[in-house]
Image: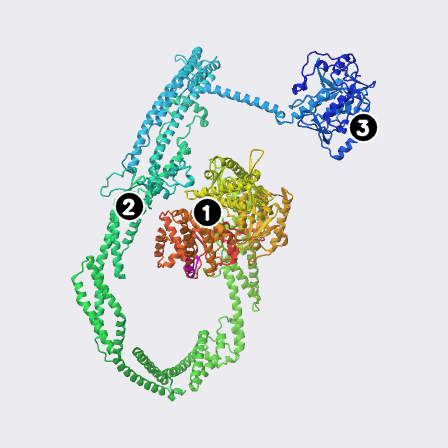
Amino acid sequence: MASSGSRPSTNSQRTPTAFQRLSPGLPAVSSTSASTSVHPEEQPEREQRKAKKPKRPEDFARAVESATGSNPLVRGLYSTSNSLAKPSILNTVKRPKEAEAEAAVGGKKVKRADYMTPPPPRRQLDDDNLRALLTKSPAPTSPMLRSPSSAPPICTTMMPRIDPGSRGSAVSQPLSPVVGHYALVPRGGFTSPTMGSPSGSRMAFSAMVETTEEPMDVEDRSSPFWFISKLRAQAAASEDASGPESKEFVYLKVVKPTDRSVFNPYNLRVVSHDKIDPDNYCTMSSKGVTHLIRQDADFTPLGQWVREHGIFHSMFQIPFFRKFRRWKTFYFWRKYIRRTTINKYKDYLEDNLFILNRELCRPLLQVRRLCLEIQTIPMYKVTGPETETLERYCQAQGTQRDRTHKELLRITQKISGILSDACKLSLKAHSDNDQLRSLTEETTAAESTAALDLEGTSTSASAAATASAKKKSEKRAKTFKDINAVQLLNVNPVDQPYRRSYTELSQKRAECRRLTSYIRLADYMVIDSVVALTMKSLSTLRDALLYPKPIAAPTLALEASPSKADHSAKPGAKALHDSKVPLAARRTSIMAVPTMGGAAKKSPEPPAPTGLDDSDEESPLPEGTEPPIFMTEVLFRDDTIVITPNREAYEFRVDGVIKGFTDTVLKIERFLHMEEFKAYTEPVMADQGEDSEFGMGPDVSLMLSSEADYKSLTLSVKDSLGAAFRDVEAHVTIFDVFKRMYLENRRMDPQKIKSEEPPLDWFREQMDKYKQQHREVEAMRKRAVVGLFLVVTKRLKEFFQPSPVNCLAEIHALLPVLAREQNAKLLSELTDAVRILNEHPTSVEEFVSYLQFHQHITERIEGIEQEFENIKETYMLADMEGVHVAQEDNLAFQSGTVPLMQKLRLAITFADDSKEANIRKFAAEIDERLTQLKARVDDVHSRAENQIISDEEANMEEVITYVTDLQKELEQIKQTEKTLTGYQELFGVDISRLEVIFEVITDVNNKVKLWTGLRDWIGLTRLWNETVFQKINPDDVGNELQKYVKLVNQVSRALPANPVVFKLKALVDEFKMTLPVIQCLRNPALQKHHFAKIDEIVQRELSKEPDYTLGVLIELKVMDLKDDIQNVSNTATQEAALEDLLAKVQKLWTGGGVGAKPVEFIVSPYKDFKDVYVLGAVDDVITQLEDSGVIISTVVSSRFCTGGLRTRTEQWDRDIRYMNETLDKWLEFQRNWMYLESIFNSPEITRQWPQDSKTFSTVDKQWKELMKKVYENPSVYRILISSSMNLREKFDANNKQLERILSNLEKKLEEKRRHFPRFYFLSNDDLLDILAQIKNPAAVQPHLLKMFDNIKKLEFGANATDVMAMESSEGEVVPLSKPVKARGEVEKWLSLLEQSMVQSLRRLAKLGFQDYDKRPRTEWIFEHPAQIVLTLSQVFWCAGVQAALETPGGGGLDALKEFQQACYQNLTDLAALTGKSLSRIERGMLTTLITMDVHSRDLTDQMVAEGVTKVSDFGWRKQLRAYWENRDDGSGDVMLRQNNSEFTYGYEYQGCQPRLVITPLTDRIYMTVTGALRLCLGAAPSGPAGTGKTETVKDMAKSLAFQCIVYNCSDGVTYKMMEKFFSGLAQTGAWCCLDEFNRINIEVLSVIATQLAEIRQGLLVAADRITFQGTPDVVLKKTFGAFITMNPGYAGRTELPDNLKVLFRPVAVMTPDFRMIAEVILFSEGYKDAKSLSLKITQLFKLSSEQLSPQDHYDFGMRALKSILVMAGGLKRNNPDIPEDVSLIRACRDANIPKFVSEDIPLFNGILSDLFPGVNLPSHDYGDLQVRIDEELAQRKLQFVPAFNLKITQFYETLIVRHGVMIVGQTMSGKTTNRDIMKGALTKMRALGSRNKFAQPVQEFAMNPKSITYGELYGEMNVLTNEWRDGVLPIIAKQVVSDPSEDLKWIIFDGPVDTLWIESMNSVLDDSKLLCLD
């Protein structure tokens, strides 16, 4: 029993408990009953309550079993005594008031502990812990309990399963185990068991505990569940069910939350009696829980309380109830804020709305009416039916604008007066001092305002205005209750001074501010009206100049595409108004003429203008033709046809009209600055100064320029005018034929024709041509209507009319002159011929002349007769043409030429008859004369044997005269013999030659040489012997001696027995022995000491005898001392040579001699800096240093270098080496300084890296001082040697400083790259260029394409720092979802840009996904970016296939077939769009989309054929599928799957790039790539060139929207380069495709294998950061992918190491399906018959590769095929009316024939004709291009050769379709000339305003790749300094790429092609167009 205490009072009222209030479904319990069953005196009441419970224990047990099931374990938990059945003990509770409570248990009194432990945290126990917890020993009994029995307070219940069919009843099912110390109950809880059966107490307790869902901590003794567990333990310990019922109870305290969490009424804690709240506490016993609130008590049975406890906590697991209080608070707060805000602004509007003010309302409405009147003023004058010139048109518009300006001035003055009166009235009302009157007036004003007759104001609005004004009056009366209105508004009596207070001044300013706002409102209304007037006028101008005009449907029936029939009403008018519609299409609309049947008829090109009758130039226009607006005239000026005024003039003047609209409205004075309003506005503006909100207000011109409609209308006017003028220009092109006619006629030169003497047919053709020209000129119209223009050509016709007439007159005048001259010439020739042929020869010579002339005239007779006939026909033609011929000319021909022709024929006949007789006669005479000549030769030969010739003692002069005479006589005989044998040859008889004469001539000539030589040699030696020896030239002596030695040898062979020969030979040999001594003694190197030695040798002091002769030396017999003298001479020579070498070096560096300069540095100014210099080219200095070093080494190593010479030489050796070393360090320093100077010259770099900047500044100062000294004295020797600057040591120290700066710079750049990994794809120079311009965000634009896949440039906002959009290289602009602030560190905002790119594309993808079902697909594709369209198209295709395959009931195949038809329909719709006029971006996107849709269609066909019916079939899973998956945050993502691989779309912006045609080979590569990526591997496609390896990898990256960087490898790749490359890829998550990977050296490949292995290891463990090559914390993104491509079997390839092979999955790539690729491309280009044409073109390639000759430059691969297909697509679009096969044939011909040799062209044409039988290809007219080519040929003085001209045009055709062209040919075949001619022609075409888009000026960059090394061509890395140096090609390429002009840039490799340099151009020449450097 509990200790005695006060008994709580009871209440008879039954109120719901707190638990029932929270759980309204529970029954109410009487508070009276809840307060009983505690004390013994309450036994009767307890008995009454007990009577309501089950009387028998078995009844209670049965009830509990129905709730708990038949599980014995559950029932066993409550195997306790039947004390529950005893009513005397049940709920015996005592609530004492004393400080310490007691509980009676078994007659003992124990004190309860006055502490309470907090509940342990919720935890999850494993099986071992649970087992240990369940088996632990019993805990000691708590002193708080009265019962001595104690069991461990652990709940080990099982949760029964509730049958859903029976509400509240438990079904016997296996129970799940308890986890931890928490009981689990179902949501519905249990049916409350009937309490009262003693035997059922265990089950009752089980039911109590089981029905809670809140964690029940039975370990915490302060928890009520601990007490319940205690009771359960007691019940389990008692085996006697009839035992005494437990009378224990505990005090419970309701725990209130200390924070804002939800109050839990079931959060009770066991406490001692002294800690309860007497007014609010609970007690718990085995019966239940009693809640006492003051004097009221509520009782809840224990089972019911436990159930309610569980329900309460289960309910709060529902999000609605858990968040209810939070949301309720938020809703109340939001409602309050809205109400407060609305009331605030409502009051503000009531106080400030001018429309509710009595004084200001009516004037405001009047201003509104005047503003509406402004908008009705016409500012544009609509022209009448008369056509005006441009000048008159502009004058009329100017006059109209003047009228408008006057009207605007009138209205604004009227508005100004209204505003002035209103302000005065308001000021007067405000200054009234009577408060009541003020209140009354304001109330009256509000009512009158409401009663005004407002235009368009409803009754309800008036009532609202009245109420608002009334409320405003009341508020104002209250606000200004105590303020004097006179003082407030500064209205003072005149007769007394009054000083305003601060409050009054403030009120005055407030009223002025209010009136200023009122004036500004009126000003804005006027501004809005004039802006509307301007827009209206501009719209009127647009309508007037709209071109082409809309054509009504009944009048003009335009052909429509079948696919667009449903939507013809929507785009029809737009197409006619759209200025972007092609000219051809608009011509069709303009010139369509209605026929009787109502159908439209197309006019031929160019458009036929509306004709006017030339006979009456003022005749009216044809009916139905709108009058033109402008009159323009066509004239011929400066050798070209011009339109005057021209297009620029019209555009300028129309722009002037538009600008006039703006200027007119800008002339209106603003009200705020008018004099009459300054009294109100100046105080306000003076107070606020520059920040005043009452400034000038909006700028009208700025408003108009920023208005989208203004821009659109202006652009529409310009487009319409441009379209109309283009038609005029197209019309004027019909006069080009007359221009060419005139220019050609003007070049006609009669004198040149006369000198060339053209044939008569030429004259006939020219006369016919000029007659036809005259007829055509006469037929020219004098005026015509072309759209908006009346084109007048009257003066043009008058100009052209005289040209053919004059030319015809010139031809007529030339005919008789040519005939007369030709006749005179022929007459003279006939006269001479007849005279000569009639002569009779008498000698051989005369007959020879006669015979030669006879042969000549016989050959000439045909030409003479032809000339005769020409002259005759010329006279006949002149007679037919009516040309006057002089009578004497006609007589000379008839009487002179005609008879002589007859005589000539007779004379020739006579000569022929007498020819043979004369030949016989004169041939005999020739033979006789030859016999006489032979006798003379014999006589000379006999005389040549005279003995005097062999006598060495004979007189030389006589002998020489004798033999010379014989020589002359023989020459005369030889000449006569030659003449006579020539006659015999002419006669045709046998030739008789004198053979003996040649032998005699040779013999006589040798004898002449012998004797003349003997004479000359004797004289020469005599001269030398008598000459002073010092004057003898040894060289001359030697040359003469050699000449006579040769002569002796020659005569010795010819005259071996002649004694004179021996005499000459002896004399020569004797002198020959003396020559070496002469040379030695005349050696210029001999010095005094050398001569002294010679004197000793010859034993005579010759050095002291300057006049001795050679004869003296001979007498001394110096020949015998030859060896000694030669030794002295050789020594002198060697010493002199060494001295010369040393002197040369010394002179080179020191400059010795007058005027000789030493070697100097070339010092050049550095950039544009003042007094800053650098060394220029030092190649010459280095070369000279090397040469000097070689010379010095040579001198030192010579054995003749001795004494002082050696000392000087060694010093120079040291100087040369020092200069070399110093110069090397100098150049190294200069190179580093120039590199760093450009970096630290930037203030931004200096600010970011101050320490390095300071170090560099110190070095820089020293450098500039040194270079200034070098500039003043550039001598190399003086700077490096003579000066005392110790340059070598200084440069050494400074180089170390610069190397330290470079090292720090590299580290800092690495930090930048780590922050923004895409910087890894930039070179150091590019990155530094960005960092140096960090305040200029636009500086990053040139480098964007290197960092992003296809972001070419960014669009910035007005402040130039907000990045608003990104633009692709194709010109597509995609806005960013949120502008990126391009401020601060560039790497940070670029990272934000990268994130914004992804977010923007994801957002656009979601918008596109949601928009797909809202519009037709053919419209949807043009409303979203190309990348989004292509990706979502794949998503919707996959969704369609997926939906079909998921069709229930096995109908997947049928549904797939239906979807197949939808795919065909989609393709048909897209194909219909190809014929429309589309922008370049739209056409590119459409072409790509068709390519992808064709693949989707083929896949659908394949799945239907294979019978794919489920989504799990491999035929579907193997495809690359795209899905849209929504996220929990409302966003979504595109997911791509293939087989077991899954990828998230990368959202890398790709623009509108083309996509690859997907073939089965492509699908196989895709599966390999995705499978490899799933295993964290790469893929290695390998195969021949041109099979699509690299393009497939790139296309796969495009499908996933990953960045893919293609790199063309070479043997120059180093492991350091690849380390940086892979680091950037890993941190960016991009892909790389290493093309020609096996070109890398094996050593580098081994390191690459290690690098890739480290990355793969990180990917396998899903690491976010890895240590890469020793660098820690390298970010690793899981999207990283590395791929390689290889060409196996090529020369120079490396076998991959095994550890590298395992990192890549190989895939073999062979030749793709050409036919399939050709079909898809042709279809995407708009070809309807793509299937058959693709088969033909693939057959063409196959047959050409088999039948044509094998040439190295022939290519019939994929690249060649694609270029032809792209060309065919362009031809199809440009000429849609030409048959498709003709376009394809022309593409094949133009692309292939230029590369064929001449022998293969007929065979290729034959193949074409076989594949396309009966197709005739029209010839191509190059028009203006051909004219410019002809001009270039003439300017260069080159002949027009058709074959060469063909090659030029073929070069042009190839340039259009290929960005890489190779001109192949032999040397001097015209390759360079071809290129130069094309360059000049294109440049001239551009200069003359050609509309050909390819006609641009050409910039050439030529080089010979074989003249420099590979490193000099491409660049190379310095292995020691790790510094990259660009080669010639990269420098040129960067210059070309950075040039924004549209000029054509030709990089020319003028030299042989070999594999050493051309392979590195692979990525440049393919579609990548990327120059990869090592």
Q: Is residue 1872 left or right of residue 1348?
A: left
Instruction: State how far apart marks 2 and 3 are (Cα).
Output: 122 Å
Instruction: State how far apart marks 3 and 1 are (Cα).
Output: 87 Å
Q: Earlier in the sequence, mark 3 or mark 1?
A: 3
For label 1, the residue is 1723
Q: Amino acid at mark 2?
A: Leu
Q: Main secondary structure of the magenta part?
A: helix
Q: Earlier in the sequence, mark 2 or mark 3?
A: 3
- Mark 3 vs mark 1, foreground winner is 1
- The boundaries of the magenta stretch are 1795-1805
Q: Which mark is residue 138?
A: 3
Q: Which mark is residue 101?
A: none
Which quadrant is home to the N terminus?
Answer: top right
Residue 1333 in view:
no
For label 2, the residue is 635
Q: Amino acid at mark 3?
A: Pro
Residue 1840 picture location, percent across and down: 35, 58
Q: Would you call the spot at circle 1 few (<14 residues within 10 Å), some (14-19), or many (20 or more)?
A: many
Q: Earlier in the sequence, mark 2 or mark 1?
A: 2
Q: Considering depth in this image, is 1880 or 1123 the residue closer to the camera? A: 1880
Query: What is the quadrant of residue 1215 in the picture?
Result: bottom right
Residue 240 in view:
yes
Question: Badges 3 and 1: C-beta atoms under 8 Å apart?
Answer: no
Q: Is residue 1934 left or right of residue 1306?
A: left
Q: Secondary structure at mark 1?
A: helix
Q: Is residue 387 above or below residue 1036?
A: above
Q: Secondary structure at mark 3?
A: loop
Q: Would you call the spot at circle 3 few (<14 residues within 10 Å), some (14-19), or many (20 or more)?
A: few
Residue 607 picture location, percent across and down: 32, 44
**What's the residue at 26%, 57% (across, down)?**
765
